Image: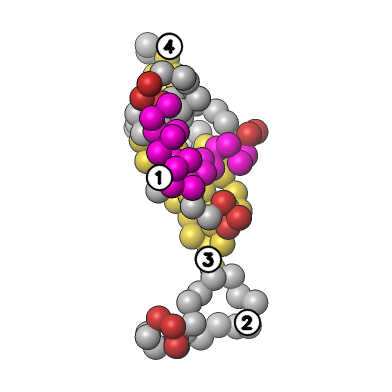
Amino acid sequence: MAGDFNIDLDRTDHVSVAINNFLAGHSLVRCDDMFPAAKVSTYVNEALNRSSTIDYIVTSSPQLLLDYYVTEPGSNFSDHLPIFGSFCCNPVPSHVSGQKPNVYNSQNDMNILSFR
């Protein structure tokens, strides 16, 4: 799940605690916690001199997370910075999914799912 949570989850106010308890209770892991070097502000308002981290990607499969970072594009028409997460996705065999077989180059092919 990815998006603007509109709350800094590193704070200890009652809303942050409630959301963190929900995440923990449902075995959801914040991707920014898995990449501490990428823990930077995602909301930046230079005119108000304000910044905070309020945009997150959470996952129930942290072992599949390949990369996470916050980008600072040259042209950004939002006060939120884009967050990026890349996950390893193994294809579901056609006999399980009931779909037509996919053609892969080898049995070791890996698909990547990215959120931007």
Measure the C-alpha gap from mark 1 to mark 4: 25 Å
Q: Secondary structure at mark 3?
A: strand
In this orientation, which residue lies closer to the viewer: 56 or 82?
A: 56
64 vs 9, left or right, is: right
Q: Which amino acid, by three-letter code, is at mark 4? A: Asn
The stretch in magenta equals 17-35
Q: Secondary structure at mark 1?
A: strand
Q: Are marks 4 and 2 in contact (CB under 8 Å)?
A: no
Q: Which residue is mark 1?
A: 2
Judging by the rendered image, the residue that carries numbered circle 3 is: 89
Can you give x and y, in whole percent of width and height, for residue 96 in the image?
44, 83
Q: Is residue 18 magenta?
A: yes
- The mark closer to the camera, 4 or 3, is 3
The location of residue 21, given as percent across then percent down, is: 44, 34
Mark toward the viewer: 4 or 2 = 2
- Residue type at mark 3? Cys
Label disc, if present, on residue 49 of the rendered structure: 4
Q: Residues within 10 Å of mark 4 (few under 14, many from 20)?
A: few
Task: Give the residue type at disc 1.
Answer: Ala
Residue annotated with mark 2? 107
What residue is shown at x 37% (from left), y 11% (from top)? Answer: 48
Q: Nearer the N terminus, badge 4 or badge 3?
A: 4
Instruction: State the CA–CA distance, disc 3 to disc 1.
Output: 17 Å
Distance, label 4 to label 3, CA atoms, is: 40 Å
Residue at the image position 63 percent from the left and 83 percent from the top: 106
